[in-house]
Amino acid sequence: MSWSVLSVAGPPSDDSGALDDATDRANEAAGWVQENWSTWLSVGLRIVLIMVIALVLRTLIRRALIRLIARMNRSVQAVEGTALGGLLVNAERRRQRSEAIGSVLRSVASFLILGTAALMVLGALNINLAPLLASAGVAGVALGFGARNLVTDFLSGVFMILEDQYGVGDTIDAGVASGEVIEVGLRVTKLRGDGGEIWYVRNGEVKRIGNLSQGWATAGVDVLVRPSEDLDTIRSVITQVAEGMAKEDPWNERLWGPVEVLGLESVLLDSMTIRLSAKTMPGQALRVERELRWRVKRALDEAGIQIIGGALPPADEPAADPSAGVSAPSALANPASAQSIAASPLPSQNLSK
């Protein structure tokens, strides 16, 4: 009977000890939570407030940039409908440029706002940012060395777009390639060459750019005539041609100044060069030069003035004596001459006698 009582009474004492330990731990946890819940709440509210402000600010800035780009595009379309707008504004070029600038600005704004918010959140959690910033700096340096070409292309593209060095529709000479710009990107510019080929030029490889579509162009034509022609007559003929060309469509729009006779470029024994020059619309210099050569050639032909092109015809010279190319007769041709006898072999003798 006593053994049964002891066996029954023993286990309840162990269960009560475990229950007491659990109760103590629960009380300690509840006390720790009660002591720190205000801190957690303040930190949580701070993090939520930081994220809400960051997202709202990012949304407002992105909407402002989108409206700004849309306003720029509308202004370009409004100017494009005018007569002057067709000469000065390329809608596709301005649209791509504005879209690229807007994309860059939106990306930069998002990176700055969200990056600052992330650092503020880590600071609110009492995380030491010094090792993180040091690691990020080392990683940034390593990434810069490993992807320096990509970074160079991107930065060059950003500054190229911001400075409006060239755009879609421009004819440029980029050093490594030349042609008409058909697409402008932050890393690569796409050109179409004179033969129809497409060149992909990395923006970081472009060291100098010659834009042939900005401002104005110069058409230069050289006219080669005989030095015996009358210069006043040639000037009069060219002046009439230039005045007639400036009054006809579409050359009256492509010519932005009168065709000037600059004078004699060179005078040689068999020819003299007269140089013409005219200020033209950007990208129209070659067409103006071809048309001007065509008109000047026809006008000079009608005036009886011959233009020199290629090899000059041989001048008239007196006929040469046909016997001048015949050599003098040789003394060895006559067997009776002293030179022929001296050169003949000795006669053979009979040695048997």
Image: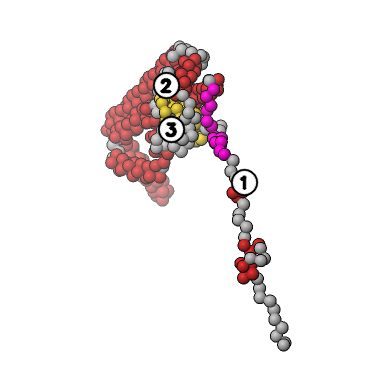
Whole-number angstrom distance, CA of label 1 to CA of label 3: 37 Å
User: Dividing the picture into quarters, in which one does residue 321 lie?
Assistant: top right
Magenta stretch, main secondary structure class:
loop
Residue under the point 39% across and 37% down: 207
Secondary element at image label 3: strand
Query: Sequence-wise, which precedes: disc 1 or disc 3?
Result: 3
Query: For mark 2, does the 10 Å Cα neighbourhood hold few (<14), some (14 to 19), or many (20 or more) residues?
Result: some
Q: Which residue is mark 2?
A: 260
The answer to whether 158 is drawn above or below residue 8 in the figure is: above
Q: Which residue is mark 1?
A: 322
The answer to whether 324 is drawn above or below residue 200 in the figure is: below
Q: Which mark is residue 267?
A: 3
Q: Position of residue 46 (x, y in %)?
A: 30, 28
Q: Amino acid at mark 3?
A: Val
* Magenta-drawn segment: 304-318
Residue under the point 63% across and 64% down: 332
Magenta includes 310? yes
Q: Residue furthest bottom?
A: 353
Is residue 161 something one can see in this rendering?
Answer: no
